[in-house]
Image: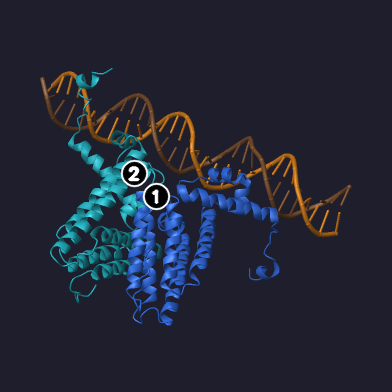
Chain colours: A cyan, B blue, C orange, D brown
DNA sequence: TTCTATAGAGACCATATGGTCCACTTGAGG
DNA sequence: CCTCAAGTGGACCATATGGTCTCTATAGAA
C-alpha cells in the first residue's frame, strides 16, 4: 500500500443533474418530516414515500440513516444560516434587532408556536446520540451567534452601544432566549413565551444603548 | 348502561408493596435511560434490563410504551417541582435567586453541560408526538414558572423589586433563558452558555431592583 | 446507434422492538 | 394449612424498520 491514492483517481463517481435533483428531493423531504415528527420518529420509508423515490435512491446517496441525518444537519444549518445572514449581516441599530425579532416571532406564530427551531430540536435529540452531529450543530450555533455578535460589534463601534457591552455574551444570551422561547412556545402551542423571552433579551441589550431609545419593542 | 359505575366497585385491583416497588423501579430506570438517550431511542427492553424486571411487569403496570412515557412525564415533573420548591419557595431576595442559579449551574456542570433539562428534552421530543404528554409538560412548566413568579411577587411586595416589574413575564423570561441555556450547553458539552444565559436573565431582573445591589452575580 | 455507467424500482432479508400469553411463585387472609 | 389473586419469568409472536440485492431504464460519450 502507499501509491493507490496516487494511481487511482479516487473512483470519482460521476453525478448527474438528475441524481443531484433526487438527492435534493430526499433531503427536502427528510427536512420537512423530521421537523414535525423528530428524527428518531421518522422512518426511511416515510422519507422514501414523501420524496417519491425508492430504497435504492436513499442508499445511493446516503450510506445509512445516520449519514442522511448528518447530511440533514448540514442542509438545515445552511438554510438557517442563509436566512439569518439575510436578517443580520446588515444589522447596525437596535431597530434592526427588533425587526429581526419580529420576523422570527411572526414565522413561529404561523405554526402557533409548534415545531420549534430546526436546529434546536435536532440538537436536543442528537447531542447524546451522534457526536458528529452534535459537533456540527454546536458549530452552527456558534456561527449563528457570530452573526449576531458581529452586528453588536458594529453597533458598539459606531457608538450605538456602550463600550462595556460584551457582544459575545449578549449574543449567547439572545440565542439562549430564542431557543428557550422556541421550546416553551412549542410546549405551550403558543408563541407568547417566545415573545416574552426575546423581549427580555432585547431589553437587556437595550440597557447597553448609549442613548436609550424610545422605540417600541414591538 | 348507566348504573354499572355505581354497582361495580371499579374492579379495584389490590396493589401490594412489592408491586409498587417494582413500578417504582421501572420508572426510575426509564427516567435514567430516557434522560441520556431520549425517549424514542430507549427501548422497553432497555428499561426491562435496567430495572431488573420482566416484560410481564412492564405490561402489568403500564398499558403500553406511551403510558409508560406519560407516567414518566408525571414522575419527572414531580421530581423537578419538588427540587425547585426546595430552592424557590423561600425566595425573598435577589441573592436567593443567585443561589438558585448557582445550584442549577453546578448540577449541570457535573455533566459538562450534557443531557439538558429532563422536562425540556421531553417537551422537545414529545410535543409533536403525544398531545397528552405535551399538555402535562406545559402545565408543569407553568407550575415551575409560578414558583419563580411567586418569589418575585414576594420581592415586589416587600419592596425589593420596583412596582413596574412584571413577575410573570420575568419568570417566563428566566425559564426561557434556563431552557435555552440547557440546550446550548448540551450542544456544546459545556455549561458556559447556560451560565451566560442565566446571568443575562438575572441582570435583567436586577435592573428592577429598588436599590441596585453590588452582589456579584456568581 | 451502441456502449457503459449512473439512476431507479422494488422484491427481499435480518433483526429489533412493541406487545401477548401462559405457566410458575409468592404472600396475605381465612 | 389452604386458597387465590397478585406478582413474576420468559418464551413467543407480529410487524416495523433499516439495510441489501438484482434487474431494468436512461442518458451521455464515442
- Drawn side of residue A92 relative to residue A187, left or right: left
Taking the spot 55% from the left edge, 51% from the top edge, the residue there is B64
Mark pair 2, 1: CA separation = 10 Å
Q: Do callouts 2 and 1 mark residues in contact (Cβ within 8 Å)?
A: no
Could you tell whether C17 is left or right of A120 in the image? Answer: right
Residue B172 position in % (x across, y down): 38, 69
Q: Foreground residue, A34 or D23?
A: A34
Q: Nearer the viewer, residue B108 or A19?
A: B108
The x, y position of residue B209, in whole percent, is 35, 76
Secondary structure found at label 1? helix
The dot on residue A125 is 1
User: How many other residues sit within 10 Å of disc 1, few (<14), some (14-19) or many (≥20)?
Assistant: many
Residue under numbered circle 2: A133
Q: Do badges 2 and 1 share one subunit?
A: yes
**Residue D21, image quadrant:** top left
Query: In the picture, which quadrant includes the C terminus of chain A?
Result: bottom left
Q: Relative to B10, is A25 above or below?
A: above
Instruction: Check the image and report above or below for B74 versus C20.
Output: below
Subunit ID for the residue under disc 2: A
A60 vs C22, left or right, is left
> Visible in this render: residue B174?
yes
Asked if one can make out residue A112 in the rendered structure from this viewpoint, the answer is no
Q: Find residue B147 and report its horizontal and vertical position in percent.
A: 47, 71
Residue A201 occupies quadrant: bottom left
From the top left corner, tell me how far across and down residue B31 is, in percent. 52, 52
Name the subunit of mark 1: A
Amino acid at each position: 500500500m502507499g501509491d493507490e491514492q496516487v494511481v487511482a483517481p479516487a473512483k470519482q463517481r460521476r453525478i448527474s443533474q438528475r441524481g443531484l435533483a433526487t438527492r435534493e428531493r430526499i433531503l427536502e423531504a427528510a427536512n420537512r418530516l423530521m421537523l414535525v415528527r423528530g428524527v428518531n420518529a421518522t422512518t426511511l420509508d416515510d422519507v422514501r414515500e414523501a420524496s417519491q423515490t425508492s430504497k435504492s435512491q436513499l442508499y445511493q446517496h446516503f450510506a445509512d440513516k445516520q449519514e442522511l441525518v448528518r447530511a440533514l444537519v448540514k442542509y438545515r444549518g445552511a438554510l438557517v444560516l442563509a436566512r439569518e445572514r439575510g436578517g443580520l449581516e446588515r444589522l447596525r441599530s437596535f431597530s434592526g434587532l427588533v425587526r429581526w425579532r419580529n420576523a422570527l416571532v411572526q414565522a413561529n406564530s404561523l405554526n402557533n408556536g409548534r415545531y420549534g427551531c430546526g436546529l434546536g430540536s435536532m440538537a436536543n435529540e442528537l447531542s447524546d446520540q451522534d457526536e458528529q452531529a452534535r459537533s456540527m450543530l454546536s458549530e452552527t450555533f456558534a456561527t449563528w451567534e457570530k452573526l449576531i455578535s458581529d452586528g453588536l460589534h458594529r453597533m458598539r463601534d459606531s457608538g450605538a452601544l456602550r463600550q462595556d457591552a460584551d457582544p459575545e455574551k449578549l449574543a449567547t444570551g439572545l440565542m439562549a432566549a430564542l431557543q428557550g422561547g422556541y421550546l416553551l412556545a412549542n410546549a405551550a402551542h403558543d408563541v407568547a413565551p417566545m415573545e416574552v423571552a426575546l423581549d427580555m433579551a432585547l431589553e437587556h441589550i437595550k440597557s447597553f444603548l448609549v442613548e436609550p431609545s424610545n422605540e417600541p419593542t414591538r
